[in-house]
Image (cartoon, helix red, strand yellow):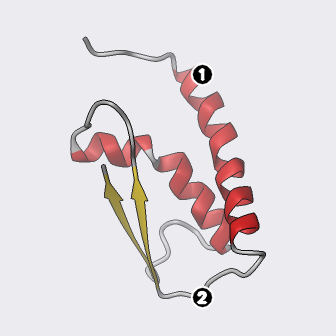
Amino acid sequence: SNHREHWRHRQKRAGQQRPLIAAALRVAANCAVPAPPLVVVLTRRAPRRLDDDGAVAALKACRDGVADFLLLDDRDDRVTWHVAQ
C-alpha cells in the first residue's frame, strides 16, 4: 500500500530534521566548515527503496540541513549532490 501523510506532518518533520542535521554536522566537524567545491552523498536507509525522485524528495530536509552547515544555498554550483539508498 502507498502511505500518504498529511502535509502538515511532513512539514513538521522536515522542520525538525533540518536544524538537527546542521547541528550534528557542526559537532562532528568541530565547527570546521569544509570549503567548496564539494561532493555530498546523502544515503537514505529504510526498509523499502524509493524511485529516484522519491529518494531525492525524502532527503530534501537533510540536504537543506547540510547546506545550512556549509553556509551555502543548496543550489550552489560548487556543491554536487548525490542521493543513494
Q: Position of residue 80 (x, y in %)?
A: 39, 75
- The vertical placement of 50 against 31, above or below, is above
Q: Position of residue 64 (x, y in %)?
A: 57, 56
* Image mark count: 2
- The vertical placement of 64 against 31, above or below, is above
Image quadrant for the N terminus?
Answer: top left
Residue indicated by mark 2: 35
Q: Position of residue 28 (x, y in %)?
A: 69, 67
Q: Is residue 81 left or right of residue 8?
A: left
Give the residue type at disc 2.
Ala
The residue lying at 67 percent from left, 39 percent from top is: 15
- Of residue 60 and residue 49, the one placed in the foreground of this image is 49
Q: CA distance from mark 2 to mark 1?
A: 35 Å
- Of residue 25 and residue 78, the one placed in the foreground of this image is 25
Residue indicated by mark 1: 8
- Of residue 26 and residue 52, the one placed in the foreground of this image is 26
